[in-house]
Image (tube, rainbow, N blue to C red):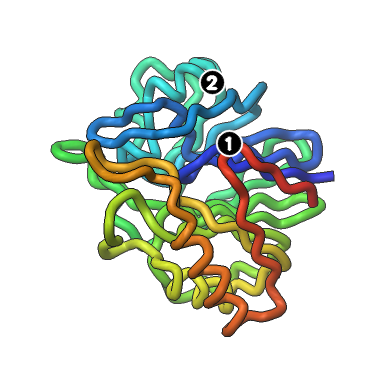
Amino acid sequence: MAEVRWLGHATVVVDLDGRRVVTDPVLRRRIAHLRRDEAVGEPGDIDAILVSHLHYDHLDLPSLARIGIGTRIVVPRGGRRTLRGFPLVTEVLPGDRMRFGGLEVLAVDAVHDGRRRPVGPRVQAVGYVLEGTQRIYFAGDTDLFDGMGDLGPLDVALIPVWGWGPSVGAGHLDPDRAAEAVALLRPRVAIPIHWGTYRVIGAKHAADPTPAEAFAAATSRIAPDVDVRILPVGGALEL
C-alpha cells in the first residue's frame, strides 16, 4: 500500500514500500514575508527529506530541524553549504539515483532558478521520481521542459499549479501549463500542489481553491484519462 499526504505548499509525505519520505518540508506559520493560515501536523518518522531547490519556501532550516537534525537530506548539488549543522546531506544532479531500503529515488530535471537569494549559491533545481511498487513524481518548482514526457509511466504526479501571490513568474507552472505537463507525463493520478497555503502579509486568505480547480478543469479537457485529486491541507490519498 502507498499513501500521499499533502501538508500544504510543496510539502508532501509519501509512504511507499515501508519507507516514508517528505518533500520540501515547510511547516511553520511564518516564512519570511509569507503567512500560513492553517497549522500543519507533524510528518512523523521520516527516512529521507527530498529538497528540490533552495528557495526559502522550499528549504526551511527550522522545519528541517523540527523533523530531526540527523535525518537524511537530499539536495541539489551545491546546496550542502546551506545545511551546515545537518550531518547527513546528499547532493544530487539529474540522473543520480539513491536507495532507501526497497525504495529507489531518481533525481530529474527541473526548469527553475533554485538559488538561495540574495547571495546564496546558484544551484540547479531538481525534481524526484520515487520508484518502487508504484512510481511517484514530485516536480518541485518547474516549467515545462524537454524530456518531461520521458518520465512516465507514472502512478502519481505531484504537480505545482500556482504559488503564493497574485501571479506566477518564469520557472513555474500555472493551471493551464500544469495540465500540459500532465498530458506529457500521463500519470494515473495527478495531485495539484503549491497552491492555497501561504500568502503575503496583508493579502487575503491563502486557501483559494481557484488554481486547483482551474487545473482540474484544464486537465479534464486535454488529458481526460488522468484522475485529478484535489486534497485539503493535511488530506491523504491511499493508492
Q: Marks 1 and 2: CB-CB under 8 Å? A: yes
> What is the three-letter code of the residue carrying label 1?
Val
Structural crowding at the residue carrying mark 2, measured as other residues with C-alpha within 10 Å and reported as few (<14), some (14–19) or many (≥20): some
Picture coordinates of residue 18, whole percent (x, y): 80, 34
Task: Provide the secondary structure element on which disc 2 rests.
Answer: helix
Residue at the left extreme, as displayed: 119
Q: Is residue 80 above or below residue 227?
A: above
Residue behind mark 1? 22
Residue 125 screen position, x and y as percent: 38, 52
Which residue is farthest bottom?
222
Identified at 56% across, 74% down, the residue is: 217
Give the residue at the far front of this rendering: 204
How many numbered discs, if any? 2
Q: Quadrant of residue 44?
A: top right
Q: Tell me: 197 left or right of 4.
A: left
Disc on res. 4: none
| Secondary structure of the residue carrying numbered label 1 | strand
Taking the spot 61% from the left edge, 37% from the top edge, the residue there is 234
Residue bearing mark 2: 67
Up the image or down, 156 lies above or below 233; here it is below
Residue type of the residue flagged with mark 2:
Ile
Q: CA distance from mark 1 to mark 2?
A: 10 Å
Q: Quadrant of the N terminus?
A: top right
